[in-house]
Image: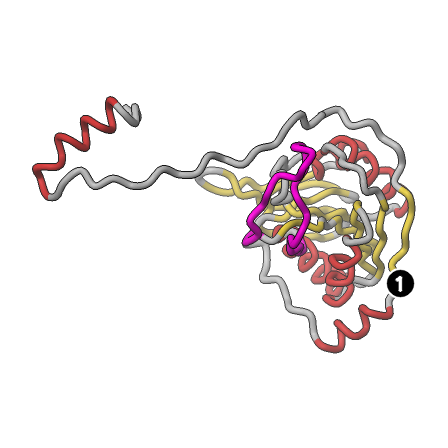
Amino acid sequence: MNIVVCINHVPDTETRVKVGPDGKTIDRTNVNYIVNPYDEFAIEECLRLKEKFGGEVTAISLGGDSHKETLRRALSLGVDKALLIKDQSPRDSFAVATALAETIKELSPEIVFFGKQSIDYDNSQVGTMVAEFLGFPSASVIVKLEISGGVAVAHREIEGGHEILEVKLPAVFMAQKGLNEPRYPSLKGIMAAKSKPIQERTAPAVESRVEVLSMWNPPPKSAGRIVGTGATAVSELVHLLHNEAKVF
């Protein structure tokens, strides 16, 4: 089985993000980067499919040389090949998806996996766009996947329950938390990943359709206030919520 997993290199969730000098991008100074958390579930599911059906898994990431760190992580977990689509310039979801789709099309995979979203911009658009560009059926926010005879049954997490879809392969899937329990890299895997080659190619030129005009940090939270104690404070609290906070 030929499997592709697309992964992203994102700021750690504990990073204190600052706006850069240009006012349109983040300041990358002293920012710690990690594998996009939802992509870890995608990687794990691809490895399990390989272990069950055979074949190989190729990890793809679009970005600069720093993305090699994330690709090395994928290789240490058991991914067979890694491909970096090099491009340092900012891209919107459309431009990212177009570049990924052109590359994936050449690999002729039976399964393409993404995390359900990337935690940097949280657009949740790239995986679905790639499926559309490839002409593949897709299923997002999946928490269970069963494959048999060229047909996949995907369980999607929706509000109030699960939705079950049946799609024919090739197909694109977007992993939700709970799909599996991601493994940790072994020492042997970490050492082997250091010597595995990472293929590189230049990203195709695609014009973004969204322009970032400005970025800014949210205003600092105001200090809390104690309006009193016990039942006597209730009327004052209601007054402030109604007239000052205007929450009702």
Q: Quadrant of residue 198?
A: bottom right
The residue most toward the left is 232
**Residue at screen point 62% across, 50% down:** 38
The residue most toward the front is 21
User: Is residue 161 highlighted in magenta?
Assistant: no
Q: Quadrant of residue 129?
A: top right
User: Is residue 16 highlighted in magenta?
Assistant: yes
Coordinates of residue 236 in the picture (x, y in percent):
15, 31
Q: Is residue 73 above or below residue 135?
A: below
Q: Is residue 203 left or right of residue 75?
A: right
Q: Is residue 223 left or right of residue 128?
A: left
**Residue at screen point 68% across, 28% down:** 212
Query: Badge 1: few (under 14), some or many (20 or more) residues near its Cα, within 10 Å?
Result: few
Between 158 and 89, the one lying in front of the other is: 89
Q: Is residue 145 visible?
A: no
Q: Is residue 103 visible?
A: yes
Secondary structure state at the residue bearing disc 1: loop
**Residue at screen point 63% across, 55% down:** 41
Name the amino acid type tagged 1.
Pro
Considering the image in quadrants, where does the C terminus appear?
A: top left
* Magenta segment: 13-35
Judging by the rendered image, the residue that carries numbered circle 1 is: 197
The residue most toward the bottom is 188
- The number of numbered discs placed on residues in the rendered structure image is 1
